[in-house]
Image: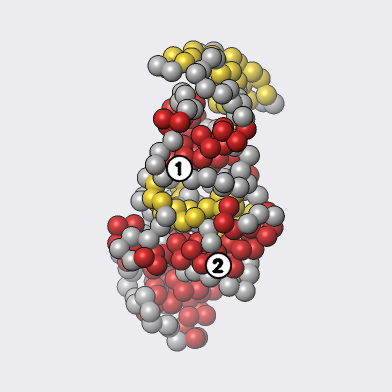
């Protein structure tokens, strides 16, 4: 069953079948329970807590008749867990990262940088970001005392303004909820400091979707090292080969390949998948334009396994 915020029962009619929606009162919220009516496919039962903004996407996928014709050529099998990058994959955080960078440069007596420049510096953790923002160079490091002064200021400012302008991508929550409905554990593997990653996910209302959240300072190594993915697989008790890594950057793809995971690149993040695909080392195994596409490819195989 899907659970939505709604005021009255409705019936949604699709070409492949019909979904009857009945009202149900849970806690203080009035929610809806959708019982699946006859389809020409195995019946599934989904329990998903969603915001109304996800409703159209969820109904789109609920209306599918789950037969082999819906399995795309890139269908992925034997997936037991899904790992996600954070910035540029689950959410667009550049506005707040750029605001913190501008405030830090002003504090240090420097001119502000364009948001696009800051965006190009994101992906290797805040420590690296501070070096790049101070020097305005991706590869150059700031003087130690200047970096320390900037880092302390940046961390405090950013922590106080984590989600002023940051928001999940349009279909993030719908995609996560669909995967959760299949019983697949989800994890976040980001190079952002763990304490910031956890707090940001809480503020965005996404933290409860994840069984594990690993930041860039959670382990001795971070992406592109395979260690975070290997550690996540060990915690979940699965083989890394049965986990997918979803991200927007070269770090995500390289880490996935090194760990033996399937790499999934997103086209809506900060990385250029067309450019990354030109190099075998950074070419993802699969490219998607929205998170629900993962479910669209996983679900048919899952349905077959459950028969």
Percent coordinates x, y for residue 174 in the rendering: 50, 37
75 versus 46 height, above or below: below
> Disc 1 and disc 2: Cα gap in Å?
24 Å
Q: Is residue 27 visible?
A: yes
Instruction: Report the residue at 41% width, 45% height from top.
Output: 74
Crowding near the residue tagged with mark 2, few <14, some 14–19, many ≥20 C-alpha atoms within 10 Å: many
Query: Image quadrant for the N terminus?
Result: top right
Tag 2 secondary structure: loop
| Residue bearing mark 1 | 75
Q: Which residue is mark 2?
A: 226
Between 184 and 305, the one lying in front of the other is 305
| In-front residue for pair 165/211 | 211
**Label disc, if present, on residue 94 of the rendered structure:** none
Mark 1: which secondary structure? loop
Give the vertical position of 96 relative to 39 (above or below).
below
Q: Residue at x 45, y 62 (%)?
A: 253
Give whichever of discs 1 and 2 has the lower sequence position.
1
The answer to whether residue 85 is above or below residue 184 is below
């Amino acid at each position: 069953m899907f659970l939505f915020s709604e005021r009255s029962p409705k019936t949604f009619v699709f070409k492949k079948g019909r979904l009857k929606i009945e009202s149900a009162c849970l806690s203080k919220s009035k929610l809806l329970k959708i019982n699946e009516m006859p389809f020409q496919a195995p019946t599934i039962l989904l329990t998903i807590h969603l915001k109304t903004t996800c409703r159209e996407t969820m109904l789109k996928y609920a209306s599918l008749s789950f037969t082999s014709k819906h399995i795309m050529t890139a269908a992925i099998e034997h997936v037991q867990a899904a790992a996600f990058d954070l910035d540029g994959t689950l959410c667009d955080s550049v506005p707040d990262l750029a605001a913190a960078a501008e405030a830090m440069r002003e504090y240090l007596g420097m001119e502000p940088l364009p948001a696009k420049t800051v965006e190009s510096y994101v992906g290797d953790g805040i420590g690296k970001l501070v070096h790049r923002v101070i020097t305005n160079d991706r590869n150059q490091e700031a003087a130690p005392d200047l970096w320390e002064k900037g880092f302390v200021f940046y961390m405090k400012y950013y922590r106080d303004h984590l989600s002023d302008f940051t928001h999940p991508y349009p279909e993030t929550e719908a995609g996560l909820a669909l995967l959760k409905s299949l019983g697949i554990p989800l994890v976040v593997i980001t190079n952002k400091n763990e304490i910031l990653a956890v707090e940001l996910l809480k503020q965005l209302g996404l933290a409860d979707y994840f069984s594990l959240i690993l930041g860039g300072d959670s382990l001795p190594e971070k992406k592109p090292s395979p260690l975070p993915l290997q550690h996540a697989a060990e915690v979940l008790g699965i083989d890394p080969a049965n986990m997918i890594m979803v991200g927007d950057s070269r770090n995500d793809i390289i880490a996935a390949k090194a760990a033996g995971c399937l790499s999934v690149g997103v086209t809506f993040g900060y990385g250029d998948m067309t450019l990354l695909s030109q190099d075998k080392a950074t070419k993802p195994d699969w490219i998607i334009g929205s998170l629900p596409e993962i479910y669209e490819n996983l679900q048919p195989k899952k349905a077959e396994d459950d028969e």
